[in-house]
Image (tube, rainbow, N blue to C red):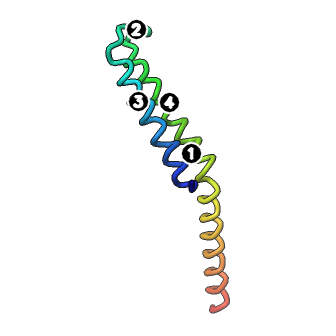
Amino acid sequence: MSNEVKSVLLAVGVPFAGVLGGIVYLSDSEFTVLGFPVLFAWLFLWMPLTSLCMHLAWCLFDRADFEELERADLAADRAARESGAEAA
């Protein structure tokens, strides 16, 4: 499985499954957490968990590709400046 697929699964698939699973299993529950229905608490919990999943996907799978592209762009800019300085 490629890193892109792994990244998408972690950043989108895990939160989607978590939210959808919570809706399915907790929709009929009458429990409360701090006065809120447990389903609302579950959905609120997934807000920071989704950000965490996106951060992990970036750190584990995407950061190296981004840094490689940045280095290539910097090298191309440097080469363009040097060739422009030689022409002048």
Counting from the top left corner in percent of width and height, residue 53 is at: 53, 38
Query: Could you tell me how far apart the alpha carbons at marks 2 and 1 are, in whole angstroms?
Result: 32 Å
Mark 2 or 4, which is nearer the eye? 2
Within 10 Å of the Cα at label 3, are there few (<14), some (14-19), or many (20+) other Cα atoms? some
Tag shown at residue 57: 1
- Label 1: which secondary element: helix
Which residue is labeled 2 in the image? 32
Q: Is residue 64 left or right of residue 16?
A: right
Q: Dividing the picture into quarters, in which one does residue 18 lie?
A: top left
From this view, report whether residue 7 is shown above or below residue 68: above
Compare marks 2 and 3 and give the one earlier in the sequence: 3
Q: CA distance from mark 2 to mark 3?
A: 17 Å
Which numbered dot is residue 33? Answer: none
In this rendering, the label closer to the viewer, 3 or 4:
3
Q: Residue at x 38, y 30 (%)?
A: 20
Image quarter of the N terminus: bottom right
Q: CA distance from mark 3 to mark 4?
A: 12 Å
Tell me which corner region of the image, top left, top right, bottom left or bottom right, holds residue 52.
Answer: top right
Report crowding for label 1: few under 14, some 14 to 19, many 20 or more residues within 10 A (C-alpha). many
**On screen, residue 26 above or below 79:** above
Q: Which residue is mark 4?
A: 48
Q: Residue furthest toward the bottom?
A: 87
Q: Position of residue 79 (x, y in %)?
A: 65, 80
**Pointer 3 or 4: first along the chain:** 3
Residue that badge 3 annotates: 19
Q: Are there few (<14), some (14-19), or many (20+) residues within 10 Å of tag 2?
A: few
**Which of the marked residues, 3 or 1, is nearer the chain's N terminus?**
3
Measuring from the top left, give residue 7's x and y in whole percent.
54, 48
Residue at disc 3, secondary structure: helix
Q: Position of residue 88 (x, y in %)?
A: 63, 91
